[in-house]
Amino acid sequence: MKTKSTAPAARRRGLSEIERKKRVFAYSMIAPVILIFGFVRILPIFQNFLYSFFHSSIGNPLEKFLGLANFTDLFKDHLFILSLRNTTFFALFVTFFSVIFAVLLAVMLSSPTRGGAFYETVYFLPVITPMVPVAVVWKWIYDPTYGLLNYILSWFGVAPVGWLVFPDTAMIAIIIMSVWKIVGYNMIIFLVGIRDIPESYLEAARIDGANTLQVFRRITLPLLRPIMLFVLVISTINSYNVFTQVFIMTSGPQGAPGNAVRTIVFDIYENAFRYFRTGYAAAEAVVLFLIILALTLTQFGISGSRERRERSRLKRKGASA
């Protein structure tokens, strides 16, 4: 009896020892990655928060403590207010149109067809293409003299337009290019979500007499809400961090006058690396971080409240039944 009672305990000790070794090995393998990530990503965030309270320069980032002076100066700076307004305008329209077009494309490509893989590849190619060459190509497309867009419009008798020169069209032109660049990424995510919906749900809705639009509204769209939240958050973050296409497409003689396309990241870049006001630029980065954080939390809050209302509605429906 004594031998039988000690055997399970020994096996338990052996299993726990194996499990402990597995965990030690896993943590030891992932520890260098975490340390590198913390050093490259996390530590600069805290440093940036620290520098935002100082009058900083590249040589001495902690030159003079200013408290909240950098933040109060921000909201008196008309260029910062202008860049904030432009960035919000850009983010709103890029997020809206990229999500709408991505959902439509995903619905159209969700059914297996012979050329489906080809179209998925075509729509996803802009996503994997680096931003700099894409911006250069679109800058040539928008060129008022030799651009492809004006050449095509000339077939219909439309006079050449300086798309990136006039303040009224510069931001719209960059929005169109940015939506084209990101819509394939959102489409693939929605496409995965749609194909993951059980076919039995769709068949049951069709048997009940639902048409295609009703199936999309009542079945597909509600089941895509978690994915929709993810896409909205990612698109908002990326849109508020817009810089490369603005810098490439509006530099040189094609630059839009009056800071028509000035964005927050571009303003941070100029203050930090052109005027060497690194403390002021750090304060701008902190404000940008807080704006993105607030928008993300708001989107999660709206999604959570919607889910709670849906659960309460189902509970009331079940109780009444």
Image (tube, rainbow, N blue to C red):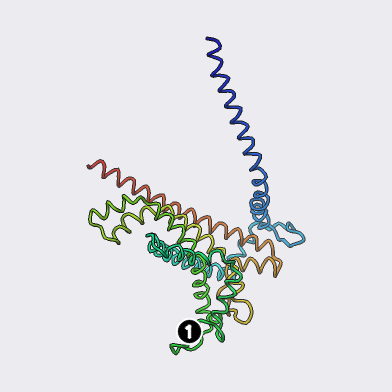
Provide the secondary structure element on which disc 1 rests: helix
Residue 283 seen in render: yes
Q: Which quadrant of the rendered structure holds the C terminus?
A: top left
Residue 89 seen in render: no
Residue 285 drawn at (x, y percent): 61, 60
Q: Please name the residue that numbered disc 1 is placed on.
A: 152
Left or right of 104? Residue 17 is: right
Residue at 55% from the left image edge and 67% from the top image edge: 84
Left or right of 104? Residue 288 is: right
Position of 29 relative to 198 (above/below): above
Residue at 31% from the left image edge and 50% from the top image edge: 201
Residue 214 drawn at (x, y percent): 28, 59
- Picture mark count: 1
Q: Quadrant of residue 257?
A: bottom right
Q: Nearer the viewer, residue 56 or 219?
A: 219
User: How many residues crowd mark 1 within 10 Å: few (<14), some (14–19), many (20+)?
Assistant: few
Left or right of 76? Residue 278 is: right
Residue at 65% from the left image edge and 47% from the top image edge: 33
Residue 108 drawn at (x, y percent): 38, 64
Point out the residue furthest to the front here: 114
Dot 1 amino acid type = Ile
